[in-house]
Image (tube, rainbow, N blue to C red):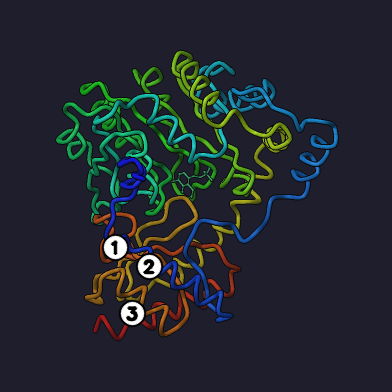
Amino acid sequence: MQLSHRITHLTGGGSDGWDVFYKARRMIAEGQDVIELTIGEHDIRTDPVILDAMHRAALGGHTGYAMVPGTPGLRDAVADRLTARTGVPTTRDNILITPGGQSALFASHHAVCDEGDRALFLDPYYATYPGTIRSVGAVPVPVPTHAEDAFQPRPDDIARLASGAKSLLINTPNNPTGTVYSRQTLEGIASVCIENDLWLISDEVYDTQVWQGAHLSPRALPGMTDRTLVVGSMSKSHAMTGSRIGWIAGPEEVIQTLITLATHTTYGVAGFIQDAAEFALAQGTALEDEVSAPFRRRRALAQDILEGQNAVGLIPAQGAMYLMLDIRTTGLSGEDFANRLLDAHRIAVMPGESFGQSAAGHVRVAMTIDDDRFAEALRVLVDFAAPLSD
Ligand code: PMP
């Protein structure tokens, strides 16, 4: 029996740099003590006050089918949050609640791309992007960004590939680079979208993790509200990765079509999870600040540790829970560096190449272990790199 081309070709094939990650997982399964700085999972769990709200909602009977677009309460809470943060008047009709940001990325591309359409995204990229685009039958087109620009996209690079394309996916604050797109960058991106009639899919799941500068949602820029779909999530902001709760914000007509899609795919999100999310949003920024504080601290620690040495370059981490380290002076690829570091010191980091060719010669470090071990791991990494770069 033959499976569909679409499903068997979802990932691009070939080495994607994730071998190091799986190797680290195998070593851990064998009982080895590996320091894992690979994926974006907090080292804290969901706050018990959120779990209490979830428990209360479940015991209160919110365990049947929930409304497919999301509960009115949560849709309103998300709409109010976006209105307050962006100034763009947003109501529940602009919001679809989704099982996490990942499914929101899928649904957004499903809504705007037809079979064979070109869908642009910026390289380096969050690892699922090309596969998500392929999963709706569209063709992923990476647009390079450059280490020397600290990975701020150049609108001209996007414009060169934009003619005839359907959509552009951006992510700020960025995973894997930690870059927060400037107003100038976003205005340039908005012009390219308007000139080329592109939908903009704006992945803002790290919007509460900004260490330098400010997060600007491109949905708020002139001419962009009607062509932007914002992907949001409680995963990173509230350490609710396992709850699978996120949203899409966009024009009402698009949300209507996405509700039809949800009816035929996810059939909504568990009601008690939505109630917990609504409770969490009602706590304001206090909970979010608590969740993001460790990354802010560790980023400062990393800056101190990496200062005054030349073996490892730090891309200025303006946001998100990762550091992108430039290890090109070692002469190794990100993949070789990560493999050797794992073998020699049992420290697992992600090769830049696993996030696209623009991140070759870099490694991504997730700041997701306690401060002391994190600082020690970084010192070991620098000591490991230093003799290679002599
Ligand atoms: N976008 C980016 C950039 C991410 O890093 C992630 C998760 N690591 C997601 C989307 C998806 O997150 P979730 O599905 O947990 O909301």
Q: Choose the circle earlier in sequence order: 1 or 3.
A: 1
Q: Nearer the viewer, residue 151 or 348?
A: 348
Taking 311 as reference, is 247 above or below it? above
| Residue 144 image point, x, y percent | 22, 47
The residue singled out by tag 2 in the image is 19
| Residue 264 image point, x, y percent | 52, 25
Q: Mark 3: few, some, or many residues within 10 Å (few <14, many ≥20)?
A: many
Taking 42 as reference, is 108 above or below it? above
Q: Are marks 2 and 3 in contact (CB under 8 Å)?
A: no
Q: Nearer the viewer, residue 129 or 4?
A: 4
Q: Are marks 2 and 1 in contact (CB under 8 Å)?
A: yes
Amino acid on which disc 1 is placed: Ser
- Residue at the (34%, 38%) spot, across then down: 133
Which numbered disc covers residue 15?
Answer: 1
| Residue 318 image point, x, y percent | 43, 51
**Disc 3 secondary structure class:** helix
Quadrant in which the N terminus is drawn: top left
Q: Quadrant of residue 161?
A: top left
Q: Quadrant of residue 44?
A: bottom right
Q: CA distance from mark 2 to mark 3?
A: 21 Å
Amino acid on which disc 3 is placed: Ala
